[in-house]
Image (cartoon, rainbow, N blue to C red):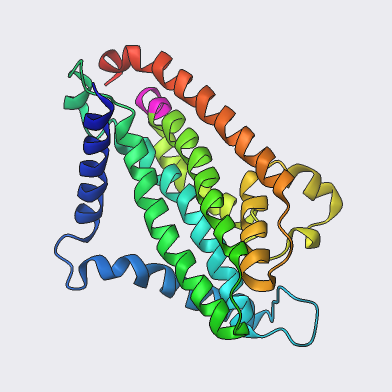
Amino acid sequence: MKLKQVIELLRTFIVSDFKSKHRGSALGFLWLLLTPCFLLIIYTFVFGVVFDRSFEKSDNSSIFDYAVGLFVGISIFQIFANAISGAPQSIISRPNFIKKIQFPLHILPISSVFSGVIIAALNLVICIVLSIYSSNTITWSSLILIPILIISSCYAIAIALFLSALSVYLRDVIQLSSFCNLALMFSSGIFYLPEEIPAPYYDILKFNPLVHLVDVSRRIILWNEPINLMLIFYLFILGVLALIISYKCFNYMKTSFSDAI
């Protein structure tokens, strides 16, 4: 199948995914922005007001700054969350496609990732606007969020390909996905800074790429700190390697999909 046809198929499934999620609702696609906003309000109240959390140690820190930093973390996390929750059912819910020899099955899990990337991109634009409103400054460093989204997509697609193939043989993956998302959310520095993690635990959590992706994005948007290009380069290389390995695993496992469905 030609690349142009694959891209068109991918676009079709992404649009279909958006429509299926909001079919029949009065607000339609507006829920794409409302859902993370509602989550932001809840998390900001619980952690920012009740527990008096802050991303800054200075007295000038405000609930608004914490809300923006939290929104950044949630936006990046949603890319991974969509992959973990959507990919396991992407193939087994469409058994007819497995019997089509010419159909590129990897499009099914990948489409669920890109729908999350689009939402995350919209949310990060909102974060930048809120940050500009708060500090009255704008810098070109915000453009680094583009490669951050690309890197996040690499990891998310790798996760989606592997989980979608594994769930064909092990349906328990679907049940475990919600617990995995919950564990990932609280272990990725969304509600706190990485330096607040006790050393023994950070030695483990530092291997989670989401910890670094969230931290870099937040430092750029909130504080306009210098960009650690070497860290971003390492994350990109590891993301590409994860994507290649996952793609090979998917191709290996898909040969027996028709027998397992």
Q: Report the residue at 29% width, 31% height from top.
A: 91
Q: Residue lying furthest left in this view?
A: 24
Going by the image, does 98 lie left or right of 36?
left
Q: Report the residue at 38% width, 59% height from top.
A: 119
Q: Residue lying furthest right in this view?
A: 199
Q: Is residue 167 magenta?
A: yes
Q: What percent of the width, then of the height, locates residue 259? A: 27, 13
Q: Report the residue at 80% width, 44% height from top.
A: 203
Report if residue 222 is visible in the image: yes
Q: In this view, does 223 lie above or below 169?
A: below
Q: What stretch is highlighted in magenta?
A: 165-170
Screen quadrant of the N terminus = top left
Q: Main secondary structure of the magenta part?
A: helix
Give the quadrant of residue 100.
top left
User: How many numbered markers are drawn?
Assistant: 0
Report if residue 191 is visible in the image: no
Q: What percent of the width, then of the height, locates residue 195? A: 80, 60
220, 22: nearer the viewer: 220
Q: What percent of the width, then of the height, locates residue 255? A: 34, 12
Q: In this view, does 131 lie above or below 101?
A: below
Going by the image, does 40 lie left or right of 21?
right
Q: Residue lying furthest front in this view?
A: 140
Q: What percent of the width, then of the height, locates residue 163? A: 44, 32
Screen quadrant of the C terminus = top left
Going by the image, does 90 lie left or right of 140?
left
Q: Is residue 132 magenta?
A: no
Give the quadrant of residue 222.
bottom right
Q: Report the residue at 21% width, 30% height from top.
A: 5
